Amino acid sequence: MDMTSFLIYCVIATFTPGPTNLVILSTVNHFGAKQAMKYSYGAAAGFGLLLVISAVLNNLLITVIPKILIAMQVVGSIYMLYLAYLMCKSHSSNPTGNQTATFLSGFMMQFLNPKVVLFSWTVIPAFVMPHYSTASAVTVSIVALTLIGFLAFTTWVLFGRVFKSFFQKHNRIASVMMALLLVYAALMIWL
């Protein structure tokens, strides 16, 4: 396996802004790092499960992906637009609660996040399966990929914590900017 290409692909796919990372950033801003970590644990668990599903159903997915892709794009786009709406609405100084930033919501987000789903569907067949066929080697690869994803989520929590005072001082602008990035991500699915 070309480890350099693999690592570059993993870093670009997991560390660059996407719906999960933007929700983590917003969660740190509104509810703190502890709540964002709960969300991140769920996101990492969902990410890992998607990788397992990809590995187990790799052959089936190759024939089914074109049929599932449109439905996933529609649901994912709607969900990202909904998250953008929530971010725009979240500019108040006293948030109503942290019920949206839970382990379960982080977990479920991964199944609606086209960036994560497409990454998990491509990284296993492109980088793992051609080089490793034993269950133990595939399992180690899945664990390593899940840890890379969790490291990315944690990095966004730390980023949010470092810049929390800035984001709180410019709360409305930060919320609108994150919402616009989510709208952009939702539109990019179709381009």
Image (cartoon, helix red, strand yellow):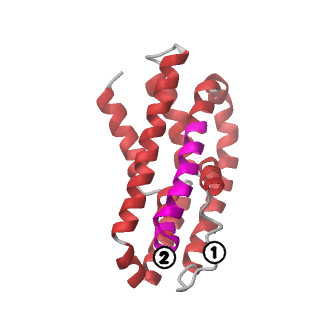
Above/below status of 80 relative to 120: below
Mark 2 is on which residue type? Ser
Residue 129 visible: no
Instruction: Using residue 61 as the reference point, say whether residue 4 is left or right of it.
Output: left
- Percent from the top left, x then y, of residue 113? 58, 51
- Of residue 30 and residue 66, the one placed in the foreground of this image is 30
Above/below status of 32 relative to 21: below
Give the mark nearest the N terminus, 1 or 2.
1
Q: Image point 50% across, 30% down: which residue?
A: 142
Mark 1 is on which residue type? Gly
Categorize mark 1 by other alpha carbons within 10 Å: few (<14), some (14-19), many (20+). Answer: few
Q: Please check the rendered image and state whether residue 31 is part of the magenta-colored stretch, yes or no.
A: yes
Image quadrant assignment for residue 59: top right
Instruction: Using residue 71 as the reference point, say whether residue 2 is left or right of it.
Output: left
Categorize mark 2 by other alpha carbons within 10 Å: few (<14), some (14-19), many (20+). Answer: many
Q: Image point 33% across, 32% down: which residue?
A: 5
- Of residue 48 and residue 53, the one placed in the foreground of this image is 48
The answer to whether mark 1 and mark 2 are in CB contact below 8 A is no
Q: Give the structural element (helix, strand or loop) at label 1.
A: loop
The magenta region covers 27-49
Instruction: Using residue 97 as the reference point, say whether residue 124 is left or right of it.
Output: left
Q: Image point 55% across, 38% down: which residue?
A: 48
Image quadrant assignment for residue 147: top left
Which residue, as the protein is rendered here, is positioned at the far top?
134
CA gap, disc 1 and disc 2 = 16 Å
Above/below status of 108 relative to 117: below
Residue that mark 1 sits on: 97
Which residue, as the protein is rendered here, is positioned at the far left?
4
Residue 164 visible: yes
Q: Please check the rendered image and state whether residue 60 is part of the magenta-colored stretch, yes or no.
A: no
Residue that mark 2 sits on: 175
